[in-house]
Amino acid sequence: YMLIYRLPFILTAAWKIIKGWLSAEAEYFIKFVDQKTIGQYISPDQLFTHMGGSVSIYSYFIEK
């Protein structure tokens, strides 16, 4: 899936144009989510706090 989190209002018109260019199958995989619905796709322990999750600090580790 491609998750679009809180699409700005001004881009809604652009989405309507782009949507017409996509096949029905491609459109199926694009999901618009907000803080209430993102938990259906991503576990809260993997989300930042402003998105309704429990992660407050981003960390990136490279194993050697």
Image (tube, helix red, strand yellow):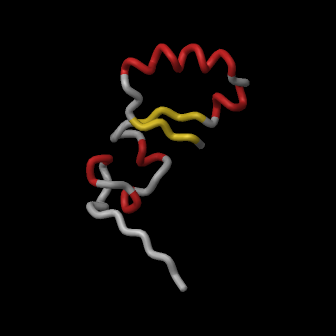
Seen at 49% across and 77% down, the residue is: 62
The total number of labels drawn is 0
Q: Is residue 38 left or right of residue 15?
A: left
Seen at 43% across and 36% down, the residue is: 33
Q: Is residue 28 left or right of residue 46?
A: right
Residue 46 percent across, percent down from the top left:
40, 60
Residue 12 or residue 34, whichever sits in front: 12
Residue 40 or residue 26, whichever sits in front: 26
Residue 55's image quarter?
Answer: bottom left
Seen at 27% across and 53% down, the residue is: 49
Residue 28 drawn above or below residue 39: above
User: Which corner quadrant holds the N terminus?
Assistant: top right
Residue 3 drawn above or below residue 19: below
Give the residue furthest to the bottom.
64
User: Which corner quadrant holds the C terminus?
Assistant: bottom right
Residue 51 percent across, percent down from the top left:
32, 47
Residue 16 drawn above or below residue 46: above
Residue 19 percent across, percent down from the top left:
61, 20
Residue 10's image quarter?
Answer: top left
Residue 42 percent across, percent down from the top left:
46, 52
